[in-house]
Image (tube, rainbow, N blue to C red):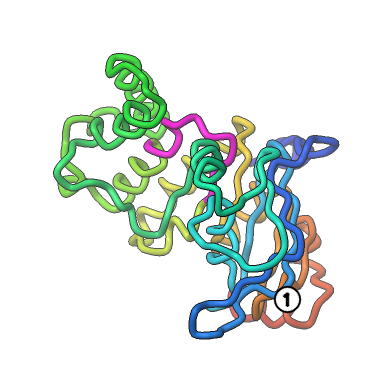
Amino acid sequence: MTQFQTEQSSAHQMGTEPVIVARDVEKWYDNGFHVLKGVSMTVYKGEVLVVMGPSGSGKSTFIRTFNALEPYQKGTIEVDGTTISHDLKDIEAIRREVGMVFQQFNLFPHLTVLQNVTLAPIWVRRWPKSKAQEVAMQLLERVGILEQAHKFPGQLSGGQQQRVAIARSLAMQPKVMLFDEPTSALDPEMVREVLDVMRGLADSGMTMVCVTHEVGFAREVADRVVLMDGGYLVEENTPQEFFSNPREERTQKFLSQIL
């Protein structure tokens, strides 16, 4: 990516509205472990936010609170103006707007690629099958695996399966996409094809929160990078400043281990 493109894509979050607002979020596991300690974060429309941190820092748990996959005990989280509560209607409304891609692909092995992608739009969005299939085929083309539409997940590579998982999330036409270490289960040669799809999404203006250790992706695509450690949000900055001039000692230590 050229410097011009980087600056252009990094400017798109300026002056835009917040899509996710987390304030003083605290979470304990059932065993008493305090995993999130007063974490606050705002994600803006069209922004690409990368969350980094050592294993066990709370980063995956934190983004899973954004679509109520993880409950939290204190603080508030608003997604597109709806506050996450125990109300199932609120949770369903938020999950319709927030797509998520996990480390594991979680595809239904007995369904074809096309059936995996059309399932939620037909059952949740109540789309007619013809519309769901048309949109699914467009998305499979967008992620570069249109020719795999009628195969089963077991016939695909890991990178192809992860691209199906991304297409499946996009089929619900979410306002936000969450990525929880989407390349960590992939062989190195397959990482690039998934990151290329994510770059394309970022260029299209999708709001994205990505937990990842892919430094190249963070430098090139993120508007902001944050570090979590020990349940705290330790530092946040532009990619340039975060990687070149980290302020916090814990950030410096983390970067010395991964760079």
Q: Name the residue at 66% across, 41% down.
A: 82
Q: Name the residue at 53% across, 37% down.
A: 93
> Quadrant of the rendered structure where residue 35 is?
bottom right
In depth, the one of 27 and 256 nearer the eye is: 27
Q: Where in the figure is residue 27, as x and y percent of width and height?
A: 61, 72
Q: Where in the figure is residue 77, as x and y percent of width and height?
A: 68, 53
Q: Is residue 152 above or below residue 58?
A: above
> Quadrant of the rendered structure where residue 45 is?
top right
Q: Is residue 227 above or below residue 10?
A: below
Is residue 55 visible in the rendered image? The answer is: no
Mark 1 crowd level (few <14, some 14–19, many ≥20, 10 Å Cα): many
Answer with left or right where residue 158 lies relative to residue 121: left
Q: Where in the figure is residue 234, as x and y percent of width and height?
A: 75, 73
Is residue 6 visible in the rendered image? The answer is: yes
Answer with left or right where residue 150 lies relative to residue 238: left
Magenta range is 168-178
Q: Of the residues shown, which amino acid type is indicated by label 1?
A: Thr
In depth, the one of 111 and 94 nearer the eye is: 94
Identify the element where label 1 is drawn: helix
Residue under pointer 1: 251
> Quadrant of the rendered structure where residue 121 is?
top left
